[in-house]
Image: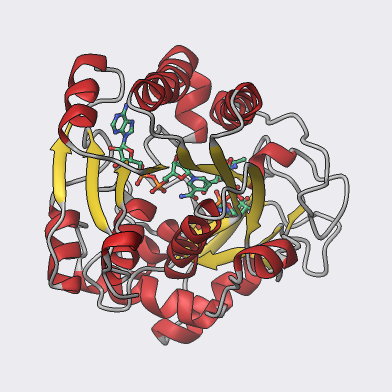
Amino acid sequence: MNKKEDEFMKILVTGGAGFIGSHTCVELLNSEYDVVVVDNLSNSSEVSLDRVKEITGKDLKFYKADLLDCDTLDKIFLKEHIETVIHFAGLKSVNESVDKPLEYYNNNITGTINLCACMKKYGVKNIIFSSSATVYGEPAVLPITEQCPKGTPTNPYGMTKWMIEEILKDIQLSDNSWNVIILRYFNPIGAHESGLIGEDPKGIPNNLLPYITQVAIGKRDYLNIYGNDYDTPDGTCIRDYIHVVDLARGHVMAINKLKENCGFKIYNLGTGKGYSVMEVLHTFEKVCGRKLPYKIAGRRKGDVMASYADASLAKKELGWEAIYDLEKMCQDAWNWQKKNPSGYQ
Ligand code: NAD
Ligand code: UD1
């Protein structure tokens, strides 16, 4: 896209220093958008934004600020002439949310309400929100379409996604000049192929891919596989893993949809293909060139047996589809881990 006056748009990216946010900043800058990041760095490092600049050769504006700090947020909106918001900022650890529900509800829900109140005050009415397949709970149908009824998330983190979707729906209902796109991510993994940005979990990773890469680099002794007695071909759970760069591109396509004054929309972002834990492990082993130790552990509480998307609506309405396969996701995750054994530190 050429940067023309009439197409000019300044995008506020909340949580832009994080895993998905940083990859999305790359895609936005590559598409000639102006990017303003607000992040409190509670789960990220400003180094990721330096790397974004290195990858793209372009600049962005960064505010170290908390969505719970209304005064600072107000000043940012006053200063920057924001036209669209991509809202990634939130706490995302399922286990931690069970221990700290108040912190999760406050950060994720109050943070979103503060953001939307500011948007309303400054007449900014375009928002893309990071939701999750977790809102489907135990899915009623497979593959999961957007028509599939929302289920009951098994933890406060999932509930915040569930509730924020409803809040945004009500805001758009109250004023139909708002455009709201909810993106329900399946399982984002991988990293930018430069190996400069990637996922940098603090402490022991909860999620499968970061755990596998840490076993491969020697930080963890073995992978625990949470259950091999599910009713699936090899007994392990099935998920729809999606390359984070594909996911990031989905946000750029969603901005184009906002420009059509789309109202309220929900899209699944997944590949449509499900892989078992074993298949992911074996694909990663192929990429890193050796067998990795694992143990079969008991089932993890709250896990669903299988979850994969019907992503045809995003293809039809956004013109988006995932292009990278599981091997590429593993290659890029491994490249990032090898180049950054201690993450951004
Ligand atoms: P992340 O933790 O890497 O990024 C979130 C960012 O938000 C971090 O940089 C953090 O510092 C920031 N943040 C948190 N609370 C904030 C606040 N109050 N004010 C300002 N900044 C704040 O996580 P991610 O994996 O990039 O996820 C991005 C979004 O996508 C999150 O909302 C997450 O819940 C959602 N999501 C992620 C996944 C996944 O598997 N990674 C799946 C589904 C949905
Ligand atoms: C989890 C969250 C989901 C959240 C998403 C963010 C739960 C129940 N769900 O999804 O709400 O939106 O992360 O990315 O936590 N596995 C292992 N060993 C491990 C880690 C995972 O076997 O060390 C298995 C899990 O049992 C699961 C699969 O790998 O079958 C994927 O797990 P994970 O990466 O944590 O993602 P989800 O559980 O799908």
Q: Is residue 31 above or below residue 261?
A: below
Q: Quadrant of the N terminus?
A: bottom left
Q: Is residue 21 visible?
A: yes
Expressed as whole percent of the image width and height from the top left, the position of residue 99 reads 48, 19
Q: Residue at x 42, y 15 (%)?
A: 106
Residue 316 image position (x, y, % from top left): 71, 68
Depth check: 307 or 245 in front? 245
**Residue at horizontal 48%, vertical 69%?**
246
Residue found 24% across the figure and 38% down from its top? 38
Question: Which quadrant would residue 137 be assigned to in this image?
Answer: top right
Name above or below for residue 292 compared with residue 258: below
- Determine whether, in the image, residue 73 is placed left or right of residue 130: left
The residue lying at 51 percent from left, 82 percent from top is 327
Horizontal placement of 60 versus 225: left or right?
Answer: left
Residue 65, image x and y in percent? 19, 29
Specify whether 280 is left or right of 334: right
Single out the residue that lies furthest toward the top.
102
Q: Give the quadrant of residue 270.
A: bottom right
